[in-house]
Image (cartoon, helix red, strand yellow):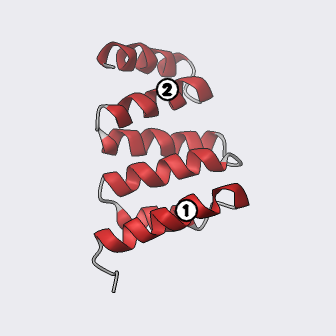
Amino acid sequence: YDQAIKILGNELNNFPTSRCALSLLGYCYYHMQDFMNAAQIYAQLVQACPDNDEYKVYHIQTLLKSGNYEEASQVCTTVENSEYTERVMLLQAAIAYEQDEVQ
C-alpha cells in the first residue's frame, strides 16, 4: 500500500479532484488502518462527488474508526439513498455504542 499511496499522491498533485485517485487513496489508507488520513481523503471524495452516497458511507466508517463520532453522526444525516438506510442505521448504532449512549 505504501507505494500505491506515493503514486496516488503524485497523481492528485496533477489532478486534485480525480475520483479514481481519491477513491483508491482512501481505500489504501483505510486498509493500512490510517483512519485519519482515510477520513480526510473520503471527505475530499464526497466534496468532489456529492451525489454519491456510497462515498459518504465510506466517510462515515473512517470517521467512526478514527474516533470522530460527532462528525460521523453529522455525515449520517446526508445519506439520502434508501439503499444505504440499513448500513447507516448500523453505523449510527456503532457510533452510539462507542460513545456509551446505548442503554
* Proximity of marks 2 and 1: CB atoms separated by less than 8 Å: no
Q: Which mark is residue 24?
A: 2
User: Is 10 on the left-hand or right-hand side of 57?
Assistant: left
The 10 Å Cα crowd at callout 2, few under 14, some 14 to 19, many 20 or more, is some
Q: Position of residue 9 (x, y in %)?
A: 42, 20
Tell how many labels: 2
Name the quadrant containing residue 17.
top right
The 10 Å Cα crowd at callout 1, few under 14, some 14 to 19, many 20 or more, is many
Q: Residue at x 30, y 68 (%)?
A: 98
- Between 34 and 86, the one lying in front of the other is 86
Q: Position of residue 33 (x, y in %)?
A: 28, 38
- Quadrant in the picture for the N terminus: top left
Name the quadrant containing residue 40.
top left
Provide the residue designation for mark 1. 88
The residues tagged by marks 2 and 1 sit, at their Cα atoms, a distance apart of 22 Å
Judge whether 72 appears above or below 35 on screen. below
Q: Position of residue 43 (x, y in %)?
A: 50, 46
Q: Secondary structure at mark 1?
A: helix
Judge whether 71 appears above or below 39 on screen. below
Q: Residue at x 55, y 58 (%)?
A: 87
Q: Position of residue 10 (x, y in %)?
A: 43, 15
* Residue 2 visible to an observer of this rendering: yes
User: Is 72 on the left-hand or right-hand side of 82?
Assistant: left
Q: Amino acid at mark 1?
A: Val
- Between 101 and 56, the one lying in front of the other is 101
Q: Amino acid at mark 2?
A: Leu
